[in-house]
Every structure is written in C-alpha cells, then in structure tokens.
Image: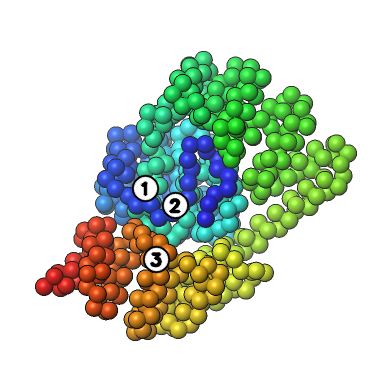
Amino acid sequence: MRVKALNLADGPTTNVGAGSGPRDERIVSEFAAADGGHILVLSDDHSLTKALRHLLTKEIAIPSTRVRVFSDNERFFEGLKDPDLDKRPLLLIVERSMHGMSCMPIVQQLSQLYQEQASIIVLTYEVPTEHLAMAFECGAKSVVVKPATMGTMLSKIANAIAPQGKLGVRITEAKGLLARKLYDPALVMAKVILEEHPDSATAYMIRGDALRGRGDAEGAREAYQQASNCAPMYLEPLKRLASLSKDFGDTEGRRSYLERLDSLSPLNVQRKVDLGDIYLSDGDRDKARECFEEAMHVAKQEALTRIEELRTCIAEKCMLKAPEMAEDFFRALLEGRQELGPGDIAIFNRLGLALRRQKRWKDAVVEYQKALAIKPDDETVLFNMAMAYADGGNHAEALKCVECALKSDPHFHTDSCTVSFNIAVMYTRAQRNAEAEQFLRAALAIDPDHERAKALLDKLAA
C-alpha cells in the first residue's frame, strides 16, 4: 500500500516491514534520558501496548514514568496536562480509530496544540490510501499499519523523533524560530538550507511562513508555490496558497488550490463544502450540488467506516478468548463489501487465524485461497496458508506455500524471529537442514535469546 498524499515534504511513511537496530535504540534512549522526552500512547490495542511498554521500559530501559499508556481520551488529555511535560519533547502515538470512532479529530487537535513540541504517529489496521492521506493531513508524521513488529515500531519511533542529519537539525531550529515569531532569523536559516538543498520544499515553507509573518503576502505566495513545485504531493503549501488566495479575495485561485487538495486527499468533508460554496457564488449550481452531494457521501461513508472499525475492534478483542465470535465479526465485515479487493486481504488473514484457533485448518485454507484469488502472490497470505497446512500435518503443502511466499518476497521474514523460526521448522520436517539452519540464524539475528531457535540449531548441528 502506498500513500498517495503526504502531509510532510521530507518523508512521512507507512511501514513496509522495516527493522530496527542499535541506532534506533540509541535515538529513543537519548530522547527520554538526555532530552527529557515523554512517550504517550492512546490505544485500546492491549497486546500492542503491552509489547510496546516492554520494549521501551525493559529492553531500552526508559524510565517507566516517561512512557504512559491510555485507553480512553479523557485520561489521555489529563495526562498531557502533567506539569512534568511542560516544554518537554513529546512523542504521541494514537490509534486512527477506537471503539468504532475516528481519532482523527484528536490527532488534528494534538497537531495544533503541540505543533513544535510533539511528533505524532498514527496506528491503524490496513485501510484505503485516502484514509492514510487524511491521517497525514490531520498532522501525523508517520503511520504504522498493524499488525506490526516491535522492530518496526522502534524504527518508526526513532525516525519520528530524530532530526535526520544536519538538514533535520536546521529544519527543527528554523521551525523553533517561527514558533517564537523570530521571522528574520528564520529567513536566514531557510536561505542557508536552500543553498545546500535547493529543492527542499520544507525550506520554502519556512521561508513562506516567515515572509507571511512579516506581512509580505506576495513573497509568501511565491515561496509556497516553489514548495509545491518541489513536492507536488505535499499538502501544506497548497493549504497555505488557498488561505492566501482567500485573503487576497482571489476566488478563482482559491478554487483551484482547493480542487487540487481535494484530488490528493478526498475525505475532507469541510473542504468539499467550501468548494461547493465557491461554485455557488460563481453561479455554477451543478458543480455546487456535485460538491455538496460528495460531502454527504463522504460523511455517510465515514459512518459506515466507523461501523466496520467497530466490528474490527470487537473481532480483535475476541480473537484470543472467543475465536468463534471473532469469526462471526470478520465474516460480517466481508459480507458488508459490495466488491472484494486488495484492501480486504488483511480481513481474510485475520479470519483464517480465527479459524486456525478453532482447529479448523481446512476452513482457514479455504479463506486464504479466496484472498489469493484477489492477489495470488501475497506473501503474508501464502505464509499463513502454510501455517494452516502445518496445523493439519500436511507438511508438503506447507513447504510449497512457504517457498511461493519466499519467491514473491525473499525478505518478508527478516523482521520477525517467529516467522523465520516457523519457516525453519517447515524445512526440518522436509529434512532440508541447510535451509532450516539459514532461517534459524535469521531468527537469532533478530532475537539472540530465542530459546527454541537455539535449541533446534544445536540439534541440527549435533
């Protein structure tokens, strides 16, 4: 899945299986220890928050007082009022939705309240691209698509809180100057950045904000236009240009910028209403009606999305204790689709797991086959199908599926010691010990303390 529209010019991303390393651990440790940073998490995903808290407080040894987890909005905002957090750098990790309700208004509010103080990461299950675009538009610096390994989480956290090299440090300093309304020094810093990085959209944004702060609206407009030229998918320059056009009374220009924003991030209801209002003022009633109807459609889809998110939330809560109930909710999700597509593969994967937990491996295989009909080379589905065949003792078919997954993506296992270990086990059952050793070593490279991998490797070496 790729994000069509990003809200930052210099690299907000979704995870695609990134790993972590000593650099990431050092960055996160220094963020808490040397910089006095705090990490606050708003999530009702208890398995993820438990693993994340263990990673941060046990493995990286961040003081537990610097890592706080909340499962409801009110306590989360109460936690943010703690005087210890005043002027401290913050990392805020927030679910895209909780209890079937979107948390995007919360993300937007946090972005406005803690613009210079906080970096925001949004957690989500796999969703269509336009939903990710909306997350970035609301202020997310990064998005993590669940289920995610702790290696991926650590890498995302490190990248969110660490300025990337000299450029990142200068950008952070320049934004700090803007926050203090020191526009002349901010202009000097923007000039320095542009001398070294003439295509930096962020530097042009800093220049535009500084010029606008000084009252030079035309200079700001030119800077924002240059920022947009450098990064056509970057939303913020277009937003600034639309705002300036409104100030100038340039209705045609404002309409043009709003139209471009709407094409990049089509789930902003208010923007569609604003566009409709402009068309109405221009006398184009047909266009106005079209925009207003699109706004209503998006609003209705948001309501349906909330129902789907609530079903997903309930299904995940049932997965461990009542997998048969989880199955019902996952099937309801699929039955609610008018047409199945790549975005539904994650549901098939979770439905398959719910069936495997009921020891119904054959039924799980059937669901994985439906997913493969949508995307025949999906390595995650192929691996999960292999696990289902292994559950049923059909080790030959399990190995076939694994080798198809590896052919599709030879590295899909490299951020998960569990996946690497399970592949090794499948090779040992086929008495292909050389391949088994390869995957056992991959598992131990990720987790040197993985006892079962060490024991199996010793057994093979004996």
Residue found 52% across the figure and 55% down from its top = 1
Earlier along the polypeptide chain: callout 1 or callout 3?
A: 1
| Mark-to-mark CA distance, 1 and 3 | 26 Å
How many other residues sit within 10 Å of disc 2, few (<14), some (14-19) or many (≥20)?
A: some
Which amino acid does the dot numbered 3 rest on? Answer: Lys
Please give the label number shown on residue 15. Answer: 2
Q: Tell me if residue 420 can be seen.
A: yes
Please give the label number shown on residue 407. Answer: 3
Count of marks placed on residues: 3
Residue found 59% across the figure and 70% down from its top = 333
- Quarter of the figure that contains the C terminus: bottom left
- Nearest to the eye among marks 1 and 3: give it: 3
Earlier along the polypeptide chain: callout 3 or callout 2?
A: 2
Compare residues 266 and 354 and report the one nearer the observer. 266
Q: Tell me if residue 138 can be seen.
A: no
Q: Quick one: which residue is furthest to the front in this view? A: 407
- In the picture of the structure, the residue carrying the numbered disc 1 is 155
Please give the label number shown on residue 361. Answer: none
Q: Is residue 265 above or below residue 332?
A: above
Badge 1 marks a residue whose secondary structure is helix
Which amino acid does the dot numbered 2 rest on? Answer: Asn
Residue 56 x %, y %: 32, 49
Compare residues 374 and 336 and report the one nearer the observer. 374
| Mark-to-mark CA distance, 3 and 2 | 21 Å
In the image: residue 332, left or right of residue 39: right
Asked if the residue at tag 2 contacts the one at tag 1, i.e. Cβ–Cβ closer than 8 Å, the answer is yes
The image quarter containing residue 236 is: top right
